[in-house]
């Protein structure tokens, strides 16, 4: 399969919700500018990293990217950030951590978070069990804040192995985790991708279908 055919296959199978669709071009452009060593992009990523672990909306210097990228239909006028705004903040700050100091792209359309971690387990230079344990901690965490702590740990490992995944899809998935009716579906999809990828690594197969994404709506 040629690279063009591969890209076409990925795009045909890739399903993004409203938030992911809105954020995808921002991730791609920011990544391209950073890889071209543009000063503005490097400054943007440095600012985004200062928002790691902080509540959405609490770092005004990154609002343009994190809050400003969210479609108006996924925002609201309440005192606290909407689910989409929280997801956007988390996805952009984690992306900035992942891309830091790398000369390869870390936003890879079509590769789910679960699949990327499954690939990480298969090639981990240290302990595959440690990757599995961290992934299980993500899957069993009782709050989104706890989920993000464990995701951050995995992203540090993904960066060391130069493994990439789809940050637009991650934003959709994080919105799902913040929506009680969809949280179980997101976790199940991550688990399927994680273990399917491990099996594929053993057999030489390749697949990346993920059913966690749905239309993002505030409830």
Image (cartoon, rainbow, N blue to C red):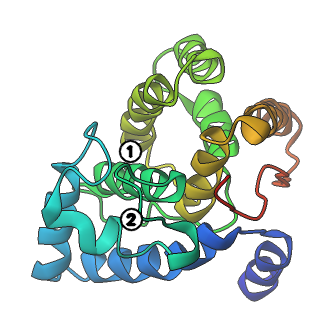
Residue projecting furthest to the bottom? 4
Residue 72, image x, y percentages: 50, 78
For residue 93, side relative to residue 180 (left or right): left
Q: Is residue 215 above or below residue 212?
A: below
Q: Residues within 10 Å of mark 1 (few under 14, many from 20)?
A: some
Number of the label disc, if any, that sits on residue 82: none
Q: Quadrant of the N terminus?
A: bottom right
For residue 12, side relative to residue 152 (left or right): right
Residue 36, image x, y percentages: 25, 83
| Secondary element at tag 1 | helix
Residue 120, image quadrant: top right
**Residue at screen point 61% across, 36% down:** 117
Residue 41, image quadrant: bottom left
Q: Is residue 197 above or below residue 50?
A: above
Q: Which residue does the numbered mark 2 point to in the structure image?
A: 104
For residue 188, side relative to residue 88 (left or right): right
**Residue at screen point 72% across, 82% down:** 3
Residue 27, image x, y percentages: 43, 73
Q: Earlier in the sequence, mark 1 or mark 2?
A: 2
Q: Residues within 10 Å of mark 2 (few under 14, many from 20)?
A: some
Q: Which residue does the numbered mark 1 point to in the structure image?
A: 159
| Secondary element at tag 2 | loop
Q: Nearer the viewer, residue 147 or 131?
A: 147
Cβ atoms under marks 1 and 2 closer than 8 Å: no
Q: Nearer the viewer, residue 219 or 212?
A: 219
């Amino acid at each position: 399969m040629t690279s063009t055919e591969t890209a076409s296959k990925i795009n045909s199978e890739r399903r993004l919700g409203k938030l992911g669709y809105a954020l995808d071009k921002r991730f791609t452009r920011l990544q391209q500018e950073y890889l071209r060593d543009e000063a503005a992009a490097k400054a943007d990523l440095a600012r985004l990293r200062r928002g790691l672990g902080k509540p959405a909306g609490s770092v005004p210097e990154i609002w343009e990217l994190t809050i400003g990228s969210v479609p108006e239909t996924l925002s609201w006028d309440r005192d606290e950030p909407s689910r989409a705004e929280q997801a956007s903040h988390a996805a952009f700050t984690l992306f900035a951590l992942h891309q830091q100091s790398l000369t390869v792209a870390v936003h890879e359309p079509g590769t789910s978070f679960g699949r990327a971690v499954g690939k990480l387990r298969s090639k981990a230079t240290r302990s595959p069990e440690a990757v599995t344990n961290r992934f299980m901690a993500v899957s069993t965490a009782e709050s989104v804040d706890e989920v993000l702590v464990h995701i951050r740990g995995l992203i540090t490992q993904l960066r060391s192995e130069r493994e990439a995944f789809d940050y637009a899809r991650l934003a959709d998935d994080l919105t799902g985790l913040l929506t009680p009716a969809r949280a179980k579906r997101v976790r199940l999809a991550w688990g399927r991708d994680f273990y399917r990828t491990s099996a594929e690594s053993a057999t030489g197969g390749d697949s990346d279908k993920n059913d966690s994404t749905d239309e993002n709506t505030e409830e």
